[in-house]
Image (spheres, grey):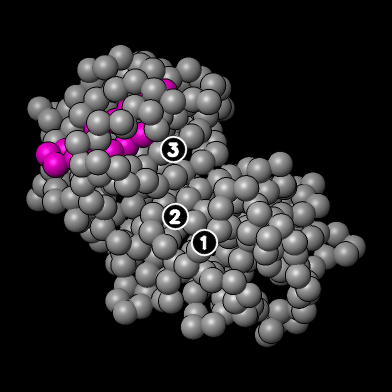
Amino acid sequence: MVKFKGNFHSPLEFGHVIIIGGVTKHSAENLIIDLMSDKTSHEIPLHMNVVFGENEQIIRNTKINGDFGAAETSPGMFTKEKNPLKSGDKFLFYILIGLDRFHISINSVHFCDYIFRSSVKRIVSCQVVHDAERVTQFDHRRIFPFTYPLAQSRLPQHLVFSNDVPAPFKEGSVIVIKASAGGNPNGAFRFKFYVGKTEKQAFNFDVRFSSKKVVRNHSANDSITFVEEDEETYGGFPFDFEKVFKIAIGFETSGIRVSINGKFFCEYPYMAKLVQFSGIKFSERNDLRLHIMEINHYRIEKDLHHLDVFSKLE
């Protein structure tokens, strides 16, 4: 069962890093992470199957034209562990794109290298399958020839999902999130974009189930505080608790446009330069539980004429 899907902001290249984090179920039998060249699993340049239990191992393979090749199951290069993860553990896969291979670390310890069997430039998407309780990180960063994005001084408190991108957003860039909210029906969640490596928030989108309000604001100012006169709440409350929703966030010439479940919701002017926007970050409040199923990146016309189509629920 697919737990998370996402496509990449831009093609993978030498010096790029993919970071996939989350938590496995306590009863986990296996966890699969695929970097795919399409969305049908027909071509998978990197397939990792994390097997728990008596037969614990991490299987690495490649699928080309629908067929897998010879599997690699050697233990970790330094620790010699077959599988450094246990069911119920947090996991953090760090996949560095090298000259001719993937360099793979698990929970900050180098585990293995995997030589390319197909072009990494064809990779467009990622999926996490089977026994993940939750996926909390899908970051795509660049460390060569220079680091982007720069590390933030402090991550937001209660961060539950992060999606960095390896290059600045441009006019016509679109992010589409598919998710649902559970837990406390009077809780809240928010997503935000920071200004570069600072703690200033270029855009804060705060969904409050208790008051049935969606508050938009920013703290892109010298005091790093929200400004009451810049706060907006028009547009109603298009979210239903424990029901799937889809948000499309588009960047146009003068500001951000948001569409929810196939309908225009709001616009908000840029309070920082678009090239300074960092990736999107999510947090929760009051015991709400946010389940992010998909996050996808697209490029469309600068006027975002067809943005609503991207937020339609199938």
Q: Would you name the residue on which mark 3 appears?
A: 177
Q: Would you name the residue on which mark 2 appears?
A: 8
Mark nearest the camera among 2 and 1 is 1
Residue 222 position within the rendered picture, expressed as x and y whole percent measured from the top left: 9, 50
Farthest residue in the front direction? 65
Q: Nearer the viewer, residue 197 or 279?
A: 279
Label 2: element kind: loop
Q: Would you name the residue on which mark 1 appears?
A: 123
Left or right: 42, with 6 as reference point: right
Given the image, on which type of amino acid does mark 1 rest?
Ile
Image: magenta residue range? 248-261
Residue 51 position within the rendered picture, expressed as x and y whole percent measured from the top left: 79, 60
Left or right: 288, with 203 as reference point: right
Residue 276 position within the rendered picture, expressed as x and y whole percent measured from the top left: 19, 56
Residue at left offset 12%, top offset 39% = 254
* Label 1 neighbour load within 10 Å: few <14, some 14-19, many 20+: many
How far apart are labels 1 and 3 at the CA level? 20 Å
Residue 122 position within the rendered picture, expressed as x and y whole percent measured from the top left: 50, 63
